[in-house]
Image (spheres, rainbow, N blue to C red):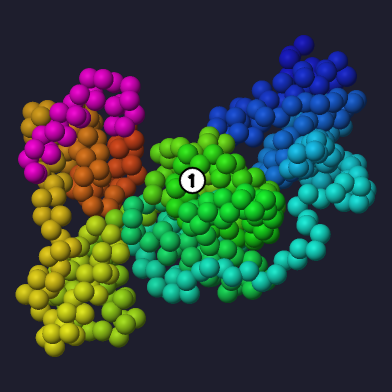
């Protein structure tokens, strides 16, 4: 008899562990390994009663995710293993979050994919027999000051290649907070690239579209200080319950929670509660989740549940559009060559770009002088001094090719020779690490390759540096040469 035929012919011969192992074998062949490890390895078979298999899942959110994303796969798998009348039920572990209370479980029906078969009823009066730990007697959901800056809106956030994904994701979240797969939404990038602006723009848009939703913006430093104050005043429970009432929580600079174990622990529970109840979380950081240090693994894994979108250094066209947008908003006119000069020479971040424009305008007002290129050079020299010796992509390509004894033209060619590919990847890595160019601009320097190729090249170099000492020696030698040349 074929192994695949055994469940259909003799389902009663299987115990719960055997049945679930056969289900896992089928499921594993139909989804990615990462999804399998995340959503199916934590499941434990708890009971087998006839043709009904009961599995235990760790949370209500876990159950809802399975039913939303894998209901058809589970339905077909159960039918294949247990036969046509086979059904699946869930045992969901519910946490009280109170020291004296133990976790309890409730039975949930399993989706059938086509809603066929007898319906399993939810237990009645659960809300009456078990106290909801998230409800505080006498505490009502009153109007909360959102702490948002009204100036931070989508229409004042200039879109470019450097931020298009992040802005598009932000618009999607604002239209359906908590109801998209972008939860949490992690916005990351260097200082002054618009993370706070975009995060607060999402909050302001949500408030406009959904007046009844409670939105709160808070920096990680203020969150930490509030928690410390709550501990001192013995009001930690009130602190937690307050944040659990939010519909949209925006936590800025989450990397500043590093090495603050108690603060991370309380945020972990707040995060879980909000996420499991379909509330939206928006986080900002100076680096992607995989590069964050000093944060617990359980937090980092949750940061990766949704979407991580980066904001990069703006290219020239975006910088020019940012300046023009600010001039329009402030009712200011400047000669085109002056605006282009500023856009060409300030490329570290948006904050310095706008600061240079403000300084120029202030100088023209106070000195009663017309703005021209000579004045622009004088005013912004303090903003550009640190970039005068910045290495260029051309010089990087030249030094890398000299090191490997290759013609520079090969870096822009389509050849896939190993030594050329290696030199190209190292050049892209240094271009991203040492220059202010966007990924798209870097790709253009290497024969018009797209930004995903640049990302892949940088990741490949980082991975090889960790595993190949000889390769790391190449990279270190070239870096020393670049730094010596640009000092």
Q: Position of residue 83 (x, y in %)?
A: 83, 27
Give the residue at x 72% y 40%.
Answer: 59
- What percent of the width, then of the height, locates residue 244? 67, 55
Residue hosting label 1: 257
Residue 261 is covered by the magenta coloring: no
Is residue 122 shown to the viewer in this render? yes
Quadrant in which residue 338 is drawn: bottom left
Is residue 327 or residue 251 the one in the foreground? 251
Above or below residue 448? Residue 172 is: below
Image quadrant occupied by the C terminus: top left
Mark 1 Cα-neighbour bin, 10 Å: few <14, some 14–19, many ≥20:
many
Give the structural element (helix, strand or loop) at label 1. Answer: helix
Which residue range is magenta in the image? 461-487
Q: What's the residue at 57%, 68% (across, down)?
A: 146
Q: How many marks?
A: 1
**Residue 80: % across, % down:** 76, 27
Quadrant housing residue 336: bottom left
């Amino acid at each position: 008899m074929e192994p695949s035929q055994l469940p259909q012919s003799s389902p009663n011969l299987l115990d719960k562990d055997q049945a679930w192992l056969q289900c896992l074998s089928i499921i594993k062949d139909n989804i990615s390994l990462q999804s399998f490890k995340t959503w199916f390895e934590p499941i434990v078979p708890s009971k087998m009663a006839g043709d009904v298999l009961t599995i235990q899942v760790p949370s209500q959110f876990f159950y809802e995710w399975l039913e939303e994303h894998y209901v058809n796969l589970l339905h077909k798998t159960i039918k294949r293993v247990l036969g046509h009348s086979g059904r699946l039920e869930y045992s969901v572990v519910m946490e009280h979050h109170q020291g004296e209370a133990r976790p309890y479980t409730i039975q949930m029906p399993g989706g059938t994919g086509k809603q066929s078969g007898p319906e399993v009823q939810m237990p009645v009066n659960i809300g009456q027999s078990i106290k909801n730990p998230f409800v505080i007697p006498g505490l009502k959901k009153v109007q909360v000051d959102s702490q948002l800056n009204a100036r931070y809106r989508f229409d004042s956030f200039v879109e470019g290649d450097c931020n298009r994904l992040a802005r598009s994701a932000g618009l999607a979240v604002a239209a359906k907070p908590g109801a998209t797969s972008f939860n949490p939404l992690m916005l990351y990038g260097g200082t002054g690239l618009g993370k706070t602006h975009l995060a607060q723009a999402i909050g302001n848009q949500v408030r406009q579209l959904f007046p009844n939703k409670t939105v709160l913006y808070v920096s990680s430093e203020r969150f930490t200080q509030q928690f410390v104050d709550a501990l001192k005043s013995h009001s930690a429970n009130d602190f937690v319950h307050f944040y659990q009432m939010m519909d949209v929580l925006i936590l800025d600079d989450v990397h500043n929670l590093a090495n603050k174990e108690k603060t991370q622990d309380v945020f972990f529970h707040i995060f879980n509660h909000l996420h499991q109840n379909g509330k939206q979380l928006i986080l900002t950081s100076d680096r992607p989740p995989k590069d964050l240090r000093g944060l617990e693994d359980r937090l980092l894994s949750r940061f990766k549940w949704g979407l991580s979108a980066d904001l990069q250094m703006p290219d020239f066209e975006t910088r020019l559009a940012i300046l023009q947008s600010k001039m329009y908003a402030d009712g200011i006119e400047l000669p085109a060559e002056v605006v282009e000069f500023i856009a060409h020479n300030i490329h570290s971040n948006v904050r310095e770009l706008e600061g240079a424009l403000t300084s120029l305008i202030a100088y023209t007002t106070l000195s009663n002088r017309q703005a021209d290129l000579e004045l622009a050079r004088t005013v912004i020299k303090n903003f550009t001094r640190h970039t005068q010796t910045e290495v260029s992509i051309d010089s990087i390509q030249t030094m890398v090719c000299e090191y490997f004894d290759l013609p520079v033209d090969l870096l822009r060619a389509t050849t896939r020779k190993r030594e050329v590919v290696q030199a190209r990847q190292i050049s892209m890595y240094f271009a991203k690490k040492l220059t202010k160019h966007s990924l798209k601009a870097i790709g253009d320097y290497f024969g018009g390759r797209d930004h995903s190729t640049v990302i892949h090249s940088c990741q490949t170099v980082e991975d090889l540096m960790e595993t190949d000492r000889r390769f790391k020696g190449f990279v270190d030698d070239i870096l020393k040469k670049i730094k010596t040349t640009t000092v």
